[in-house]
Image (cartoon, rainbow, N blue to C red):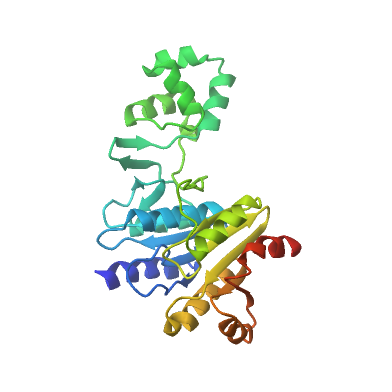
């Protein structure tokens, strides 16, 4: 199954003329990002779902996307071409659904455990209602929903059933219908209870306190992702297994290059730091990471 869906995704990317980078770390199936793909309008962080994607992997994908400002896509065989699925605030698409998203075609139907919904453009709905001099109360009567529901529609807090979507199209035209991939940059999920015992958690906490949007990542070649204004920084921590060091650094550099981000490396010992520094990486040691935010700000 792994080669089939992965190969199908690569076929789509090649067919659509999209530039992409395959992320080959970690080597096991548990990865938060498999492919980074980019066309002229959008950049996608793609996770290919084989059998079952864990909540931790999905959280990684979502938070990584939130910090760098790219669209997280979970490619899955659990849905159809024209229907997306909502999974923990990540868009789930079929292989052909991914192709449509890359082409910029609208995918407006999605399903969750709560049912099937139509994505609407809340700003267009609000503007159209105002232009046609409908109050929220007027529109609620026409649609057969509560005034609070109209408020939720217009603030992007709720989408609509197929029945309500048909009524909205009759009233305001198809312009009111949205796209699940439009403005789908998720919000950063901050874990207030996260312990700061690991090096990556300490770094993420320090950067957050210094005003960065920052998160630690479990299943990628980079362990911390941070951004502040237009500056993006990826940080990778030396793995405990020295056999994995070269591959992790190589894959981290690939990701940083694709995302046009600065890459920093944290070495566990000064001896390893000297060895890595020869390859041109900017190095910190675990003893100096508390000053890392100052160093990053100094480069701005």
Residue at 38 percent of width and 58 percent of height:
57
Task: Find residue 145 and report its horizontal and vertical position in percent.
Answer: 38, 18
Q: Is residue 51 above or below residue 159?
A: below
Camera sees residue 38 = no
Q: Position of residue 116 (x, y in %)?
A: 30, 37
- 16 and 39: which one is in front? 39
Residue 225: image quadrant is bottom right
- Please give the name of the residue rendered at 44% of the width and 16% of the height, measured from the top-left corner: 147
Residue 57 horizontal side relative to residue 212, left or right:
left
Can residue 233 be seen here? The reply is yes
Residue 37 picture location, percent across and down: 49, 65
The quadrant of the picture occupied by the C terminus is bottom right
Residue placed most toward the observer, 205 or 264: 205
- Counting every numbered tag in the picture gives 0
Residue found 42% across the figure and 37% down from its top = 119
Looking at the picture, how far across and down is residue 259, in whole percent? Answer: 57, 65
Question: The N terminus appears in which quarter of the rendering?
Answer: bottom left
Q: Nearer the viewer, residue 24 or 224?
A: 224
Name the residue rendered at 47%, 12% in the picture: 137
């Amino acid at each position: 199954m792994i080669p089939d869906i992965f190969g199908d995704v690569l076929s789509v990317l090649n067919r659509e003329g999209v530039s992409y980078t395959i992320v080959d770390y970690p080597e096991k199936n548990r990865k938060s990002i498999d492919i980074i793909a980019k066309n002229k309008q959008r950049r996608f962080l793609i996770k290919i779902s084989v059998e079952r994607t864990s909540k931790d992997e999905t959280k990684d994908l979502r938070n990584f996307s939130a910090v760098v400002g790219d669209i997280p896509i979970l490619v899955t065989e659990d849905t159809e071409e024209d229907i997306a699925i909502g999974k923990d605030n990540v868009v789930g698409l079929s292989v052909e659904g991914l192709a449509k998203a890359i082409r910029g075609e609208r995918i407006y139907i999605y399903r969750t455990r709560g049912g099937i919904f139509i994505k609407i453009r809340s700003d267009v709905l609000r503007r159209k209602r105002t232009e046609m001099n409908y109050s929220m109360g007027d529109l609620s009567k026409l649609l057969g929903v509560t005034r609070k529901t109209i408020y939720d529609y217009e603030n992007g807090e709720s989408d609509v059933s197929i029945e309500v979507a048909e009524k909205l199209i009759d009233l305001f035209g198809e312009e009111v219908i949205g796209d699940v991939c439009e403005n789908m940059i998720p919000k950063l999920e901050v874990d207030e209870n996260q312990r700061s015992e690991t090096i990556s958690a300490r770094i993420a906490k320090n950067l957050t306190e210094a005003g960065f949007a920052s998160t630690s990542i479990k299943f990628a070649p980079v362990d911390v992702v941070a951004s502040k204004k237009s500056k993006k920084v990826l940080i990778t921590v030396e793995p405990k297994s020295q056999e994995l060091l070269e591959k992790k650094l190589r894959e981290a550099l690939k990701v940083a290059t694709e995302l046009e981000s600065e890459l920093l490396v944290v070495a566990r010992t000064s001896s390893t730091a000297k060895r890595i520094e020869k390859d041109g990486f900017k190095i910190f040691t675990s003893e100096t990471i508390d000053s890392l935010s100052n160093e990053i700000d100094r480069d701005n």
